């Protein structure tokens, strides 16, 4: 047998590509890289064979906004069971591994750990830990970089969301560079408010480092949003959320972000954060090429339904359908993994599976110049999922990261 031995052959699947679904398809993988994707049962002597049994094969999901998973939080204390003493946790590399393995089970093969507004000390420390994790070969390259959401956002209630006011601040380049250095220069996405003092200059400098700048948690005027985009902002963070509950019908931050064709948008499609009509309008206005679906999940994702304690003795309830309710009213972030966003956007927009997969794989990869992944194509990383769609749900059957099987439902 030659050294060109095929290592992995997945056959009898419906391969989801950006242009359509290939029936009875085979995906061949050599040394962790996709070698071919084609219709028919391709011969590959000596390969390890996986029969997809007619189910879907797609690139692994890419989530650009993950605050934590399975009781691990990247920035704050993780979830505590009601029966346990609340314990402030310190992030470790093994915590990051636990979250990553949990995400693999959800079909997420690439994600950006997201650090939200906090003290410089905590951000620096946790970026350092995350930087160590991403270099660890056992993560199989699932973390290409990080998302810093805040602390340079609106300090106004509503727009600020759950970000703690005491740590919201104006951008100072030298301070940001400390974080950038701590992250191993791997902050690849930052969410800022366009109206904060110094924002335009800050955005320009981020762009010079190749960082994608996203507008979020802000109450920018049309003029401020335009100037931020002129200076290089290219994305909107969870559009429709991180916004006050009551806004002016004509002059609010949503219209200008929808109207400017240069701005791509991300949104949370978990079925709880936005009404279906808003998702329909976002989808129709921006079009499939300009949308990235995110989960914005926290440490409560991956945990069973129930009541959990938070820091000050208050509680949150995770419902059986994955909603996360604060005891004092309202949502307490998201606990619904990205695969639920795939199913929900299909249901409310009628976009079809090909487009839903595009908005959760190719688009997030493209926006962040991750040209080694995000599509079933020769030469890309073999980050693959096998799944089925049942009763408007996406069920992950198998996850493969860089050619290695990391999860199997059976
Ligand atoms: Zn947010």
Image: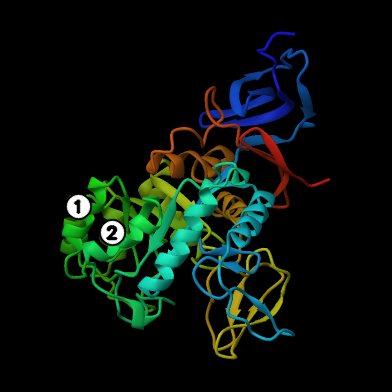
Q: Which dot, 2 or 1, sits closer to the camera?
A: 2
Q: Is residue 90 among what the camera can see?
A: yes
What residue is shown at x 53% (from left), y 33% (from top)?
A: 375
The 10 Å Cα crowd at callout 2, few under 14, some 14 to 19, many 20 or more, is few
Q: Is residue 198 placed above or below 306 in the rendered structure? A: above
Q: Position of residue 186 (x, y in %)?
A: 40, 50
* Closer to us: 402 or 181: 181
Q: Is residue 57 placed above or below 143 in the rendered structure? A: above
Q: Position of residue 206 (x, y in %)?
A: 26, 52
- Labels 2 and 1: the sequence-earlier one: 2
Residue 169, disc: none
* Closer to us: 186 or 366: 186
Residue 204, disc: 1
The 10 Å Cα crowd at callout 1, few under 14, some 14 to 19, many 20 or more, is some
- Label 2 CB-ligand 1 distance < 8 A: no
Judging by the rendered image, the residue that carries numbered circle 2 is: 177
């Amino acid at each position: 047998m030659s050294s060109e031995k095929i290592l992995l052959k997945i056959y009898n699947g419906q391969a989801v590509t950006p242009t359509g679904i290939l029936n009875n398809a085979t995906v061949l993988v050599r040394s962790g890289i996709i070698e071919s994707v084609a219709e028919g049962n391709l011969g590959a002597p000596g390969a390890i064979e996986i029969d997809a049994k007619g189910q879907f094969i797609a690139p692994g999901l890419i989530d650009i906004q993950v605050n934590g998973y399975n009781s691990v939080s990247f920035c704050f204390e993780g979830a505590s069971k009601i029966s346990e003493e609340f314990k402030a946790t310190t992030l470790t590399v093994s915590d990051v591994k636990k979250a990553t393995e949990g995400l693999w089970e959800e079909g997420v093969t690439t994600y950006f750990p997201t650090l939200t507004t906090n003290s410089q000390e905590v951000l620096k420390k946790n970026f350092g830990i995350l930087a160590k994790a991403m270099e660890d070969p056992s993560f199989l390259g699932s973390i290409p970089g990080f998302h810093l959401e805040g602390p340079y956002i609106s300090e106004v209630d509503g727009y600020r969301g759950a970000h703690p006011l005491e740590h919201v601040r104006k951008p100072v380049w030298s301070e940001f560079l400390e974080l950038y250095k701590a992250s191993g220069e791997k902050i690849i996405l930052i969410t800022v408010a366009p109206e904060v003092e110094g924002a335009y200059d800050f955005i320009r400098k981020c762009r010079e480092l190749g960082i994608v700048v996203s507008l979020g948690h802000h109450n920018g005027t049309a003029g401020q949003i335009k100037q931020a985009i002129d200076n290089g902002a290219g994305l909107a963070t969870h559009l429709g959320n991180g916004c006050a509950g009551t806004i002016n019908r004509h002059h609010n931050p949503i219209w200008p972000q929808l109207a400017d064709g240069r701005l791509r948008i991300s949104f949370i499609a978990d079925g709880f954060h936005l009404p279906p009509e808003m998702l329909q309008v976002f989808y129709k206005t921006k079009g499939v090429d300009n949308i990235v679906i995110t989960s914005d999940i926290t440490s409560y994702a991956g945990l069973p339904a129930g009541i959990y304690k938070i820091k000050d003795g208050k509680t949150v309830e995770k419902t059986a359908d994955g909603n996360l309710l604060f005891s004092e009213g309202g949502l307490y972030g998201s606990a619904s993994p990205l695969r639920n966003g795939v199913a929900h956007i299909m249901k409310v927009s009628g976009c079809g599976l090909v487009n839903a997969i595009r908005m959760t794989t190719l688009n997030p990869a493209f926006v962040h110049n991750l040209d080694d992944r995000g599509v079933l194509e020769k030469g890309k990383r073999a980050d693959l999922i096998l799944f089925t769609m049942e009763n408007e749900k996406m069920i992950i059957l198998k996850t493969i990261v860089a050619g290695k099987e990391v999860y199997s439902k059976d």
